[in-house]
Amino acid sequence: MNVAESIWNKLTRVVVFLLLLAGLMGIGVWYLPLIRQNVRLRKQLEQLDRQVEQERQTKKEQEAAIQALRDPKAIDRLIRNQLLYAKPGETVIRFEEPITNSFPPR
């Protein structure tokens, strides 16, 4: 009887251990989709954070450009440089790149 009781005790312990293990695995399988969704949402959040930072940088650059254009001298300089306008009595001199005999890059 002593041997039979020890075998049943061991089998009971093994069954309890396997039931606990199955329960833990069941909980893991139950929460696995939520964990995957959480990871996906975190990646999406990081991507959106990077996009927001890029948009902030663009906004800062555009505000600086707008602020620079509020100065009449800056507008005058911009018109002269980009549109090649001149005030009456001024002469505009343009420098062009020299023409080379080399082959164009492919």
Image (tube, grey):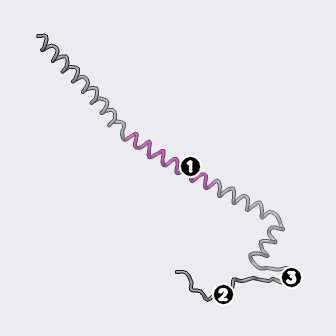
**Main secondary-structure element of the magenta-colored stretch:** helix
Q: For numbered disc 2, what is the local secondary structure? A: loop
The residue wearing badge 1 is: 49
Q: Is residue 38 left or right of residue 21?
A: right
Instruction: Locate residue 55, reporting x and y percent.
Output: 62, 55
Reply yes or no: does residue 53 show up in magenta: yes
Instruction: Locate residue 50, reporting x and y percent.
Output: 56, 51
Q: Is residue 44 left or right of residue 12?
A: right
Q: Is residue 66 left or right of residue 56?
A: right
Q: Residue at x 77, y 60 (%)?
A: 67
Asked if 76 appears above or below 70 in the picture, the reply is below
Distance from disc 3 to disc 2, alpha carbons, whole Å, reads 28 Å
Q: For numbered disc 3, what is the local secondary structure? A: loop
Instruction: Locate residue 82, reporting x and y percent.
Output: 74, 75
Distance from disc 1 to disc 3, alpha carbons, whole Å, reads 51 Å
Q: Residue furthest top?
A: 1
Q: Nearer the viewer, residue 72 or 28?
A: 28
Q: Nearer the viewer, residue 28 or 104?
A: 104
Q: Residues within 10 Å of mark 1 (few under 14, many from 20)?
A: few
Q: Residue at x 28, y 26 (%)?
A: 20
Circle nearer the viewer, 1 or 2: 2
The residue wearing badge 2 is: 99
Q: Residues within 10 Å of mark 3 (few under 14, many from 20)?
A: few
Magenta-highlighted residues? 33-55
Q: Residue at x 24, y 27 (%)?
A: 18
